[in-house]
Image (cartoon, helix red, strand yellow):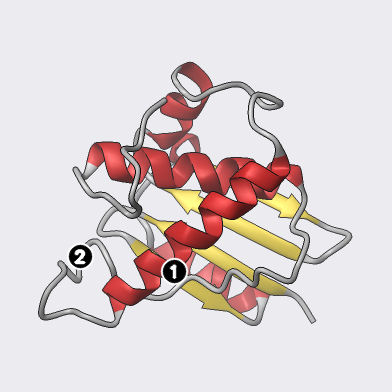
Amino acid sequence: MKTFVTLILLGVFIVSCKSTKSLTGVASNNTTTAQDTVRIANDSLEYEILIIEPGFNAWLASTAKPEGFYSQQYMETRNRQYVLEYNQRVLQPQRYSISLYEQQIDYQPTIDYGYEVNYKLYNYFIYFQLTYNQRLGPFTPRI
């Protein structure tokens, strides 16, 4: 069974899907171009993250720390914290903007997603916090 997590930030949609068909429907309804899409996959674990965010791909290539800069353990720890806070905000639409926090992210701390998935998810959270002036943890996001 494949699990997909899609991050779309034209209005920040974060969707967990159980099938490729649903994921394709979400992507085809989006008006962004292929340049705005970052695909992260760990085929051996059957996990995929799609980040469809204007500007994120360019930011990742030009501004983010290079792969190998952070350890996987460091990024997993931060990703757990960011996902927990993000998901709590999704559950509080009266307090946090539903255009930023639409759906929960299915990130299981017991699963080893691999380096690439954690790297791009971590950098997405940094980008999200810097771009939308949000703070998802006790530390200031920085590059």
Which of these two is toward me, 42 or 133?
133
| Residue at 57% over, 66% down | 5
Q: Amino acid at mark 2?
A: Ser
Residue marked by disc 1: 84
**Callout 1 secondary element:** helix
| Residue at 71% over, 43% down | 72
Horizontal side of residue 44 vs 25, given as left or right: right
Question: Which quadrant is home to the C terminus?
Answer: top left
Q: Is residue 57 above or below residue 24?
A: above
Give the quadrant of residue 80. bottom right
The residue lying furthest to the right in this view is 44
Q: Is residue 93 above or below residue 97?
A: below
Q: Amino acid at mark 1?
A: Leu
Which of these two is toward me, 101 or 92?
92
Q: Is residue 98 above or below residue 49?
A: below
Residue marked by disc 2: 99
Q: How many marks?
A: 2
| Residue at 62% over, 76% down | 21
Horizontal side of residue 21 vs 111, given as left or right: left
Horizontal side of residue 66 vs 14, given as left or right: right
Q: Residue 20 at what x, y percent from top left?
A: 66, 73
The mark nearer the N terminus, 2 or 1, is 1
Q: Residue 9 at what x, y percent from top left?
A: 33, 53
